[in-house]
Amino acid sequence: VLHDLDLTRMTQGRDTRMAAVVPWSELQNIDLGGARAPLLSEVLTFAAQRGFAVNVEMKRDLLPEGRWQWRERLALVRAVAELVRGRERVCVSSFDPFMLLASGRLLPTIPRCMLFHEGQARYLPWDMSALGGFDGFNAEHTMISRYSVAFAHARSAVVNAWTVDTAEEVARLDACGTDGVITDRPDWFAA
């Protein structure tokens, strides 16, 4: 489980390889700032033991352009489905609506959240993602307004904002009716 596509940031530039091409036997031993990359199964167990909810983001762009095709994406969807099937307090999300549609076929009871960012505004993501029958919208915080939240709630969908790291933005999103936030500062947010 890694957010970044490569190891550069987490190793302070000592290793710049794409994470997806590093074998697990090697990846598990790479120092990532005093930590190591956990397996999704480990994260799910850790979260379940503490009653935490988990948003599993399925990445669509793990390899350089042209090498990460539909076959690999579907394999990722299947692998995630095997691990999250039957679990509670788990949702899956992705910028790739096709990966979410496939996960819906494999995991009909697990909520699916469409991810999108401000750069996708010209594609009308709020409208397009409603067509997919998704359970939620994980939107870049700058795209959230009272109108967009009302639009989602009218479709019984939740709205989560990312990445929210200031008290002012939390207050604005709360006033809009946002259901949840994704933050880089969980210690600050919890306090």
Image (cartoon, rainbow, N blue to C red):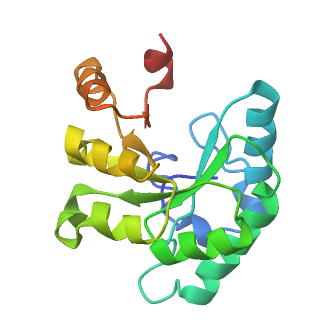
Specify whether residue 21 is in view.
yes
Q: What percent of the width, then of the height, locates residue 14? A: 50, 52
Seen as rendered, the residue at the extreme top is: 191
Q: Write the residue at 50% across / 61% down.
A: 134
In the image, 139: left or right of 102? left
* The one of 62 and 111 positioned closer to us in this rendering: 111
Q: What percent of the width, then of the height, locates residue 157? A: 46, 49
Specify whether residue 145 is in view.
no
Seen as rendered, the residue at the extreme front is: 154
Q: Is residue 16 above or below residue 131?
A: above
* The one of 174 and 168 positioned closer to us in this rendering: 174
Q: What percent of the width, then of the height, locates residue 73? A: 59, 79
Q: Write the residue at 69% across / 40% down.
A: 89
Q: What percent of the width, then of the height, locates residue 63? A: 50, 76
In the image, 139: left or right of 55? left
Q: Is residue 79 above or below residue 144?
A: below
In the image, 72: left or right of 15? right
Seen as rendered, the residue at the extreme left is: 122
Q: Write the residue at 49% across / 25% down.
A: 186
